[in-house]
Amino acid sequence: MFDVSRRRLLRASAALGLAGVASSNATAEEGHDGGMGDMGPSYNEHSSPELEKYSHELTVPEERTPDGKRRGADYHNIPVQETQHSFHPDLPDTTIWGFDGQFPGPILSARKGQRLAIEFDNSEMPDDHLFNVDEQIKGTTTENYVNYDGPVPEVRTVTHFHGLKIPPGDDGQAEMWTSPDGVEGPRFDGPVQEVPNRQDRLTTMYHDHARGISRLNNYAGLVGPYRIKSKQEEHLGLPDGEYDVPLVLADRSFTNDGELYYPGMFMANVAGDTPTVNGAAYPYMEVEPRKYRFHVINVSNGRAYDLGLVEGEPEDDGHHDDDDGHHGDVPTLHQISAGHGFLEDVVPIGPHGDMESLVIAPFERAELVVDFSDYAGQTFTVTNDAEFPYGGGHGDSGHEEDGGTGGMNMDHPEIHQIMQFRVADEAEGTDTSVDPTELSLPNRNGPDPSAATETRQVTMHMGMDDNMNMIHTLNEERWGDPVEFKPQLGSTEIWELKNDDDHTHPIHLHLVEFEVIEREHHAEGHDPEGPLPNERGGIDTVRVNPGETVRIAVKFDGYTGRYPYHCHILEHEEHEMMRPFEVVSGNGADDRPGNGHDNRGRGRDRSLGYGPDR
């Protein structure tokens, strides 16, 4: 791989013309050409059927009931299935892959310290993938693996618990896959994943992570919400029950016969042209004039959202501003968490808030309290002001010196509207939840940057591979290169994440949560700035914008072993923006329970994961 500029890529694309790869799969339309990865001129030849907006109601995933007990833990046996799903009344039913045969999957939930044992059974899955599997992408053939000479089936899955502190063998890492006919990947470590849940309360997700096809498996539907609850949050007076709602965002494209459309060859940036929320395209939600708690989870492969509320239904371009630039009289979004624990303070988001809008990149989360009490009978539309690919700005997809598009004058599919809230005339019963402006969030004990024993640099690079596909890397290394970072168990480190690319990269570290220390723009005359208001808390995925270095403080505690860190744009992660780090024991740490490790899989002593319910 060699690093090249965006303009050089464009010149190469013009010189090469079309690569001309046709898909053999019905859901990746025949004759779809597109050389140069995401630089293919025919990227935008496909568009989904036009759908009526806000004609059907939002569905809400239910919390899954355990199937029994295993070694004292609640046990879930979850089938991974190919099935039919209705995204919209105007579309025929769509073939998807789903946990429990649904998209998104059911909510998996536990109390803090309550162990779960989870088995994902893909034995009923077909032998052929929904989409074309491009063998140019590493992880799809036997020679891509070290010390493994078995087959690599086209259909294989492994489920990762995003953001959880968990032994490596239970983490659901890229080479731990299994196939429907029982072929096991080189790091497979058993069918049951044991989840300790010994960490702060959490809103996150579980999703497929199989090497070489994670982008395809997630797009097919293998993702669902995950929550860790605590007694502490129950005492805050937050909306609960039917007023505590997940909103799972995912962009998708469809063929005329209702099937999912995904390009038939590898592209480094893939975006759907249709928004879905909880598996429904352009839904509406009936709400009462009272307070709601929303868990916003972005599971799109590569699309970031810049979310706001407007009154009524805006024009097709999504803009419905008043003369003063505000979106009218709309409820404020009060953000209380970015996933782990709670923020330092409640962050009001909206025309008169600390932040104008909510930016949420792939696999980031945001917990919001929204009070509709003063808006009986009104309708509000959730809009999106982020272009694709996202380049770090409000309504801006790249560097200003390149005309706001990073030098890429490409007509990627844009999404301007997401869903609607329709406020009823009256509330049912009394709302006893606390006014979000009066919420007092619990204090947090995050990593102490002054205790850091190591500072590491991670630089994001973009270039071309030998097949003229765009490739993104970290420190110009690939997944199969030797482990570069080996933090000591229990240590705190500073990681400097530097982006000289034209994309915003959401960087995710497995095992740990971390805190943003500062953001530094590379342009002269810019001093380092503190974290954004809604970054002042625990996170596991951070947006690193073009021309920026983000410094994070990370404490590596819980388990030893090998874990990945990667960009969470799935097409970037797949090729090859994913690297391993290994937490090692030392200074007496070998004697701590739960820390024996085997780099194939899980820590063998599981006692650290068996904590009380607190």
Image: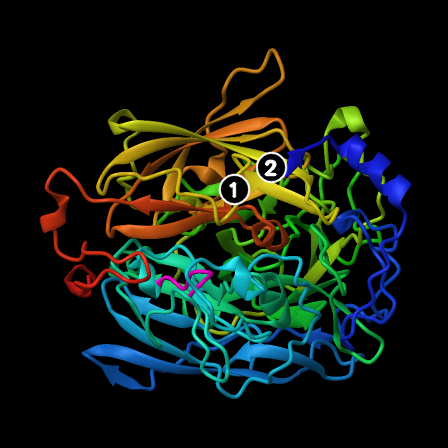
- The residue drawn where x is 44% and y is 69% is 185
Q: Is residue 2 above or below residue 195?
A: above
Q: Dot 2 corresponds to which residue?
A: 352
Could you tell me if the residues under marks 2 and 1 are in contact, i.e. CB atoms within 8 Å? yes
Between 266 and 153, which is closer to the camera in this rendering? 153
Q: Is residue 80 left or right of residue 412?
A: left
Q: Quadrant of residue 143?
A: bottom right
Q: What percent of the width, then of the height, locates residue 484?
A: 40, 38
Q: Is residue 407 left or right of residue 560?
A: right
- The amino acid at mark 1 is Pro
Q: Residues within 10 Å of mark 2 (few under 14, many from 20)?
A: few
Q: Is residue 181 above or below residue 334?
A: below
Task: Give the extent of the magenta segment.
Answer: 171-176
- The residue drawn where x is 71% and y is 32% is 4
Which image quarter is the C terminus in? bottom left
Q: Residues within 10 Å of mark 1 (few under 14, many from 20)?
A: many
- The residue drawn where x is 28% and y is 59% is 167
